[in-house]
Amino acid sequence: MELVIENLRKSFEKKEVLRGIHFTFEDGKIYGLLGRNGAGKTTLFNCLSRDIRCDSGEFYLQENGNRKEIEAEELGYVLSTPTVPEFLTGREFVHFFLDINRKNIADLKTEDAYFDLINMEPEDRDKLMKDYSHGMKNKMQMLINIIAQPKILLLDEPLTSLDVVVAEEMKQLLRKLKKGHILIFSTHIMELALDLCDEIVVLSQGTLKKVERGALDEEAFKEKIIEILKEGDHA
């Protein structure tokens, strides 16, 4: 399975943010999408999720040689600032999601079994989510996507503000989720991308560039990434 992007463009007034992106993402990998602040990472995600309309170009899934449009349930989006219905408890939220998606969920588990996957303490499961920490709300966002198992999962800097323990738990969940799925992890923290991701892709000058490691050692690889990131300064 592949996510294919062809000539994707997006401008805001006179500023061209995405300048004809061509790229193919393969399943079974976590892609680290690196870019400087304002490079257009969130804009790219918003185009792929159809939250905003791209100016031109297209994107689609390629499966077994067949091209198909991406259905809404095939794409998940984890935001850097988690959005959850704070008037519900964690358990009510999971129960509601399971209830409306029951027919589409493979290997259906109990609510507590799902909470166990994200190491949610038993006493927190029945609290209102308005009383959850940022990290707990982020875990709930991740849990919904673990349950739904979308073919494509977009993650917009979801670990940036989490403490060390929660961030490590989230990384382990992502590594387990990548088999048979396409995960694109947006961040501006290079060390995080190198630790978690199988492939590094840089968004610079409005285009995507895959950074090949080859025989480079860690420091030389970092320098190569920084060199590409700096190209945007001279665009």
Image: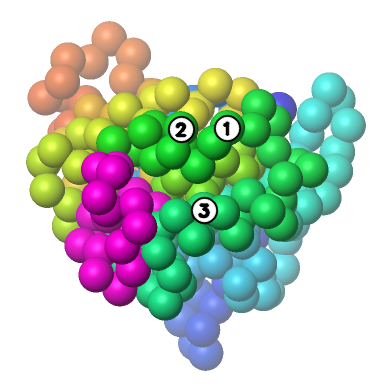
Segment colored magenta: 120-140
Does residue 214 sit above or below 139 in this rendering? Answer: above
Give me the disc on residue 94.
3
| Residue name at image x 52 percent, y 90 percent | 13
Q: Mainly helix, strand or loop, the magenta region?
A: helix
| Residue name at image x 79 percent, y 43 percent | 103
**Residue 84 locus on image (x, y percent):** 43, 68
| Left or right placement of residue 175 versus residue 96 in this view | left
Residue found at the very far top of the displayed protein: 215
Q: Which residue is mark 2?
A: 113
Residue 3 lies in the magenta-colored region: no
Residue 128 lies in the magenta-colored region: yes
Does residue 59 sit above or below 113 in this rendering? Answer: below
Q: Quadrant of residue 117?
A: top left
- The residue tagged with tag 3: helix, strand or loop? helix
- Callouts 2 and 1 close, C-beta under 8 Å: yes
Q: CA distance from mark 3 to mark 2?
A: 11 Å
Specify few, some or many for label 2: CA neighbours under 10 Å numbering under 14, 14-19, or 20 or more: few
**Residue 41 locus on image (x, y percent):** 41, 59
Does residue 177 sit above or below 133 in this rendering? Answer: above
Q: Which residue is mark 1?
A: 109
Q: Earlier in the sequence, mark 3 or mark 1?
A: 3
Query: Could you say which is closer to the camera, residue 45 or residue 232?
Result: 45
**Residue 33 locus on image (x, y percent):** 39, 45
Q: CA distance from mark 2 to mark 1?
A: 6 Å
| Left or right placement of residue 106 versus residue 234 in this view | right
